[in-house]
Amino acid sequence: MAALYACTKCHQRFPFEALSQGQQLCKECRIAHPMVKCTYCRTEFQQESKTNTICKKCAQNVKLYGTPKPCQYCNIIAAFIGNKCQRCTNSEKKYGPPYSCEQCKQQCAFDRKDDRKKVDGKLLCWLCTLSYKRVLQKTREQRKHLSSSSRAGHQEKEQYSRLSAGSHFNSFSPDLALDSPGTDHFVIMAQLKEEVATLKKMLHQKDQMILEKEKKITELKADLQYQESQMRAKMNQMEKTHKEVTEQLQAKNRELLKQAAALSKGKKSEKSGAMTSP
C-alpha cells in the first residue's frame, strides 16, 4: 500500500503527488486557501479568508504604525516607518543605492550580483525579478510540454516512416519544435502579459496615492473652513462684546457728566444765595 502524507492545513492524509509542492496542501485546501499577493508589500501569502487581503506582517505593522505610505524607491505602498519600505531599506544597506530597473525604469533596482544570474544578467527590481522568473518558469514548462509532444509525435512518425520508407517525415527532429517561432512568440506574449500586469499594479498604486492625497486635501480644506468659521464667530463675538462695553462706558460717562453738572449748578446757587442775604 502506498504511503500517505498529511495536508499541512486540514491534516487529512493523501498520496504525495496529490499535495502541492512547498505548502503540501491538498486540492480542497488549495482552493479554500489560495496563494494571493499582499495589498501592501506584494509578497505572496496563503489567504485564510476572502476578506484577508494583507499578510500577517503588514497586518501587525498596521496596528503598530498605521496605514503605510508609498516607498520613495519602489513605489510599493509598504513604507510603515519613514519614506522607504523595509525591503528597500535592507537592500540599500546591503547593496548600496538603487539603480534604474531595466524593465520598469523605476529607480528601485539593487545590484544583487548573485540574483542577476537567475534573470539572464539583467538589473531588475524586486517586482520585475519575480515577473521575469515566472516568465522563465512558464517558458521551461512550455518547452517541456513541447518536448514531450515532439517525442510522442516523433515516435508516431517513425512508425509511419517504417511503413512508408523514403518519406520526408524521416527528417523530423524534436529540436526543431523547441526552437520554433511559436515558442519565441509564447515567451514574448508571456513577457508582455507580465509587463502589463506590472504596469496595472503601478497604475493602481498611483491611483491609490492620488485618492489618498485628494482625501487629505479635502480633509485639510474642511479643517481650514471650520477654523475660519470659528475665527469669524470669535471675532464677531469680540466685536459685539467691545461694542456693548463701549456703550456701557459712554452711558456711564454721560451719567457722570450729568451728576457733575448738577453738582456745579448747586454750588453756584449756594454762592448766589449767600451773597444776597443781609
Image (spheres, rainbow, N blue to C red):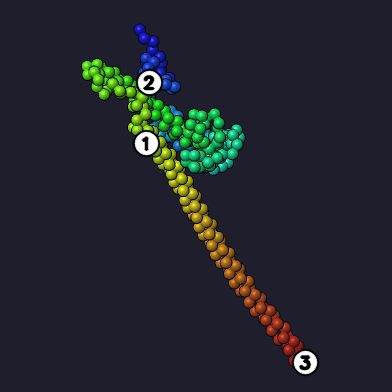
**Circle 3: residue type:** Pro
* Nearer-N-terminus badge (2/3): 2
> In the rendering, which numbered label is found on residue 120?
none
Label 1 close to label 3 by CB (< 8 Å) = no
Q: Secondary structure at mark 3?
A: loop
Residue reaching furthest front?
Answer: 166
> In the rendering, which numbered label is found on residue 189?
1
Decide if residue 192 is in sight here. yes
Q: How many marks?
A: 3
Q: Secondary structure at mark 2?
A: loop
Q: Which residue is mark 2?
A: 26
Label 2 close to label 3 by CB (< 8 Å) = no
Mark 2 vs mark 1, CA separation in Å: 31 Å
| Quadrant (top left/top right/bottom left/bottom right) for the N terminus | top left
| Pair 2/3: label in front | 2
Percent of width and height locating residue 267: 72, 83
| Pair 1/3: label in front | 1
> Is 79 left, or right, of 207 in this rendering?
right
**Circle 1: residue type:** Met
Percent of width and height locating residue 269: 71, 86
Instruction: Using the image, determine if residue 203 lies above or below residue 121.
Output: below
**Circle 2: residue type:** Cys
Q: Secondary structure at mark 1?
A: helix
Residue reaching furthest top?
Answer: 1
Nearest to the observer: residue 271 or residue 250: 250
Q: Which residue is mark 3?
A: 278
Q: Quadrant of residue 204?
A: top left
Mark 1 vs mark 3, CA separation in Å: 134 Å
* Nearer-N-terminus badge (1/3): 1
Q: Residue at x 53, y 59 (%)?
A: 228
> Is 227 left, or right, of 255 in this rendering?
left
Q: Residue at x 40, y 26 (%)?
A: 140
